[in-house]
């Protein structure tokens, strides 16, 4: 015989804890899918930060290359072109990872609706708008950092190009 459990809601009222009505095999599958979605989100976040860091490291390498390029106009112009292409690719990657995270969050929401009221209550403690705001502020920061790094590289290389062409 199952015992009736209660949980405390937002205003202190007690709410009956309704367990999931899923069969055990389906419940296990959804738990596995929930875990996979959460791991995918963590992976995509890590990839975003690593992509940004990789692009910035590439800018450092390109600036070192430009400092040793000497009087080669082609090398300096190709450095600028490559830095712009890398920026575009890096920003595109960041956006793709952001969309991937959004899709995984939708899956988490769908799966969560099938679990117990306690699970839904705990998951609902996070304000979705606040979380979305934080995610997009971080995305903006990453994009801005890539653009700023590219801008600094262009500021470093452009005088060298102008000195050669004059």
Image: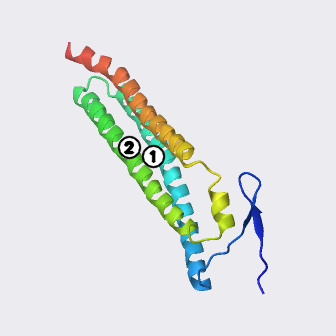
Is residue 72 found left or right of 102 in the rendered image? left
Q: Along the polypeptide, which appears first: circle 1 or circle 2?
A: 1
35, 90: nearer the viewer:
35
In the picture of the structure, the residue carrying the numbered disc 2 is 90
In the figure, is residue 22 to the left or right of 75? right
Please tell me whether mark 1 sits on a helix, a strand or a loop.
Answer: helix
Identify the residue at the far bottom of this view. Answer: 1
Q: Residues within 10 Å of mark 2 (few under 14, many from 20)?
A: many
Q: In this image, 114 relative to 163: left or right?
A: right
**Contact, mark 1 vs mark 2 (Cβ under 8 Å):** yes
Q: Which mark is residue 119?
A: none
Q: What x and y, as percent, mark residue 11? A: 73, 51
Residue pictured at 56% horizontal, 78% vertical: 29
Residue in the image at 29% along x and 39% along y: 85
Report the label total: 2
Q: Which quadrant holds the C terminus? A: top left
- Residue 117 in the image: above or below residue 44: below
Q: Which residue is mark 1?
A: 51
Q: Residue at x 55, y 46 (%)?
A: 131
Q: Quadrant of residue 118?
A: bottom right
Indicate the position of residue 72 as horizontal and vertical percent values: 25, 27
Task: Point out residue 112 in the picture as x, y percentages from the top left corner.
Answer: 57, 66
């Amino acid at each position: 015989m199952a015992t009736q459990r209660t949980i405390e809601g937002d205003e202190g009222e007690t709410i009956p804890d309704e367990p999931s009505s899923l069969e055990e095999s389906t419940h296990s599958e959804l738990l596995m899918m929930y875990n996979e979605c959460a791991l995918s989100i963590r992976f995509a976040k890590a990839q975003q930060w690593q992509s940004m860091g990789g692009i910035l490291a590439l800018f450092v390498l390109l600036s070192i290359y430009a400092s040793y390029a000497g009087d080669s106009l082609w090398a300096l112009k190709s450095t600028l072109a490559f830095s712009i292409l890398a920026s575009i690719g890096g920003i595109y990657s960041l956006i793709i990872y952001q969309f991937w995270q959004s899709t995984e969050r939708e899956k988490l929401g769908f799966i969560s609706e099938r679990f117990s009221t306690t699970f839904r209550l705990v998951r609902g403690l996070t304000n979705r708008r606040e979380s979305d705001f934080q995610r997009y502020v971080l995305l903006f920061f990453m994009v801005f950092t890539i653009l700023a790094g590219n801008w600094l590289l262009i500021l470093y290389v452009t005088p060298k190009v102008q000195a050669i062409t004059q």
